[in-house]
Amino acid sequence: MPLQPDGSFRFRTKTWFDQTDALGILHHSHYVLLMERAQKTFFVEVMGVDTLDPEVAPDVYVVVRDLDLHYLAPIRPECEIDVVLRVTKVRAAGLTVAFEFRSADGATLHCRGSRTVCRMDGRTHQPAPWTDAFRSRHEALVAR
C-alpha cells in the first residue's frame, strides 16, 4: 500500500506467534522493529532508492534522536496489521514521523507514537542538512 492521497503511507505486515511475550501478545520490542521496516519501505517509496549505503543515498545516514510509543490495545499474533506513517515536521537536519499501528480493517488503534531522526554526515558523523530532493519531497507530505 503506497502513499495515500492524504500524504500518509501504509505498510501492511503480518505478526507471528514467535513475536509474542508470555501473555501471548506482540512483545513491545517488535513494535520498533516493525516501525523501522515500514520507515525503510516509506523511504524507498518517496526517494526511489533501495539502499542503506550513505555514499549512494546520503539521507539514509541518520541517528534516532527521539522515539515516543503509546501502547493502546494489544496485538494478538498471528494477524495482519497496518503501520501508518505521516511526516509531521522537517527541519534542516531533522525529520519527525508520526506512526500508528492499526488493525488491517483500520478499526483498532493498537499503538501510536512518533520518531525523530537527525541526518548525519557519513564522513564527519556530525549533523548535516537533508539533500534538496529529500527535503522537498518530505515537506510536500507535511502540507497534505
Image: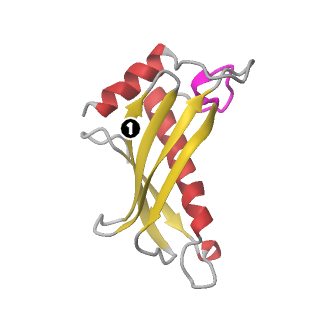
Q: Residues within 10 Å of mark 1 (few under 14, many from 20)?
A: many
Identify whether 112 is placed above or below 128.
Answer: below
Most extreme residue toward the right, as rendered? 123
Q: Residue 59, position in %: x, y?
A: 57, 25
Q: Residue 112, position in %: x, y?
A: 41, 58
Q: Does residue 122 appear left or right of residue 78 in this picture?
A: right
Question: Residue 56 sits in which quadrant?
Answer: top right
Most extreme residue toward the top, as rendered? 132
Identify whether 76 is placed above or below 126.
Answer: below
Magenta-colored span: 50-61
Most extreme residue toward the bottom, as rendered? 23
Q: Residue 33, position in %: x, y?
A: 60, 56
Please name the residue that numbered disc 1 is placed on. Answer: 87
**Kind of element beneath mark 1:** strand
What coloring was used for the rendering? secondary structure
Question: Residue 142 sits in which quadrant?
Answer: top left
Marker count (numbered)? 1
Q: Is residue 57 visible?
A: no
Q: Amino acid at mark 1?
A: Val
Placement of the C terminus among the 4 image quadrants:
top left
Please name whichever residue, 103 or 115, is drawn nearer the observer in this view of the structure: 115
Majority secondary structure of the magenta segment?
loop
Q: Does the stretch in magenta take in 103? A: no
Question: Residue 30 sits in which quadrant?
Answer: bottom right
Q: Does residue 26 appear left or right of residue 46 in this picture?
A: right
Q: Residue 84, position in %: x, y?
A: 39, 51
Q: Does residue 67 appear left or right of residue 133 in this picture?
A: right
Q: Residue at x 56, y 48 (%)?
A: 36
Q: Residue at x 51, y 75 (%)?
A: 78
Q: Is residue 90 visible?
A: yes
